[in-house]
Image (cartoon, grey):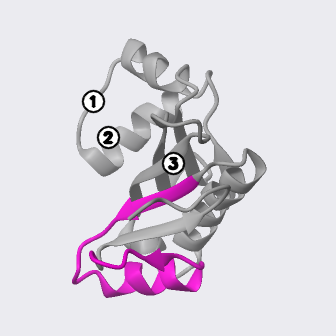
Amino acid sequence: MEFRFLKENDHEVLIRLTETFRHQQISHDKASEILNNNKILVAVALEGEEVAGYTLAYLLPRLDNGRDMMMIYHLFVQDRFQRQGIATRLMEMLLEYSKEYEIHYTCLITQQDNERAIALYKKLGGTIHPTNNTVFYWYGSGKPQI
């Protein structure tokens, strides 16, 4: 299994990813728009040419003087590839990126009944929001004012 962030020339991988997980087709131009945006991160797990799983995250500017924050928007693994540590590795890639680039904090929202995801986020050191148990944080250079 190969794990990596998509780069600006990975159009075909992003197109396959979108077909596999979103059941939609995107154009080469749309793929370029995403891949050339340095505020969008897509990490993939590839088994040969097949996309076994992926994460999608956005780097968001803050209104104050703090560094960007990261919002993890998608984390998906195909059913037949689950329980192989793929989601863990994809999340670790984003969290390592956050640390390397001193992201202010990283967050995501999950469903309250998604017990496997919640267990993963806790295992990876995610802190549950004090008033919303579907929001997880990983603090980098700053802790949000809640």
**Amino acid at pointer 2:** Glu
**Vertical comparison of 91 with 46: above or below:** below
The residue that mark 2 highlights is 19
Distance, label 1 to label 2, CA atoms, is 6 Å
Disc 3 versus disc 2: distance between alpha carbons? 25 Å
Q: Residue 80 appears at what percent x and percent y?
A: 41, 73
Mark closer to the observer (3, 1): 3
On residue 70, which mark appears?
A: 3
Answer yes or no: do the residues labelled 3 and 1 have beta carbons within 8 Å?
no
| Mark 3 vs mark 1, CA separation in Å | 26 Å
**SS under mark 1:** loop
* Residue at disc 2, secondary structure: helix
- Mark 3 or mark 1, earlier in chain: 1
Q: Which residues are magenta?
A: 105-132
Query: Magenta includes 67?
Result: no
Quadrant position of the N terminus in the picture: bottom right
The circle on residue 7 is none
Dividing the picture into quadrants, the one containing residue 3 is bottom right
Q: Toward the viewer: 70 or 86?
A: 70
Callout 1–callout 2 Cβ contact below 8 Å: yes
Nearer-N-terminus badge (1/2):
2
Percent position of residue 105, x then y = 56, 56
- Which residue is painted at 58% across and 73% down in the image? 88
